[in-house]
Amino acid sequence: MRPSELLLQYKEDIKVIFVKYPHIKSPHIFGSVCDGSDEEGSDIDFLVYPDRGVTYFDIAELQSDLENLLQCRVDITTHRGLPNQWRDKIIHHAVLL
């Protein structure tokens, strides 16, 4: 199953997972899932806006929860972690979950 199909199937469950992480806000999707070029084996790219104090451990735990639900690879990038040359384009095209 393509990740975009998994995202549609589990959208509400994904939102429930994000509720467990109240300091990681505004989850967006970007990349191949958004532009329709995803294939089986593609990952799902999430862009998030963490509060101060959120650790890499928190993000890794969220990533693990999402991967366990979706049974596909998940990449989580913070808005501060985006490469400068792509930041504006990614933020502009990212879709709020």
Image (spheres, helix red, strand yellow):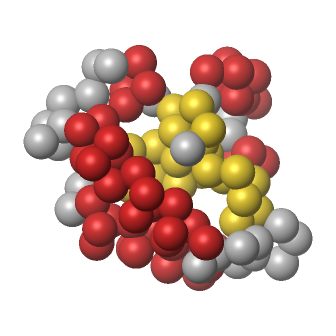
Front in this rendered view, residue 26 or 10? 10
Please provide percent x and percent y for residue 57.
59, 81
- In the depicted structure, whether residue 35 falls above or below residue 64: above
* Figure disc tally: 0
Please provide percent x and percent y for residue 20.
59, 79
* Residue occupying image coordinates x 49% and y 71%: 17
Q: Residue furthest front?
A: 12
Quadrant for the N terminus, please.
top left
Front in this rendered view, residue 58 or 34? 34
* Residue occupying image coordinates x 70% and y 65%: 24
Q: Quadrant of residue 68?
A: bottom left
* Residue occupying image coordinates x 60% and y 29%: 94
Would you say 53 lies left or right of 93 here? right
Front in this rendered view, residue 85 or 92? 92
Would you say 73 lies left or right of 83 here? left
Does the rendering let one see residue 27?
yes
Does the rendering let one see residue 85?
no
Q: Quadrant of residue 37?
A: top left
Quadrant for the C terminus, please.
top right
Please provide percent x and percent y for residue 96.
62, 38
Please provide percent x and percent y for residue 34.
44, 26
* Residue occupying image coordinates x 50% and y 79%: 61
- In the depicted structure, whether residue 50 falls above or below residue 4: below
Q: Residue furthest right?
A: 52
- In the depicted structure, whether residue 87 falls above or below residue 62: above
- In the depicted structure, whether residue 20 falls above or below residue 24: below
Would you say 5 lies left or right of 57 here? left
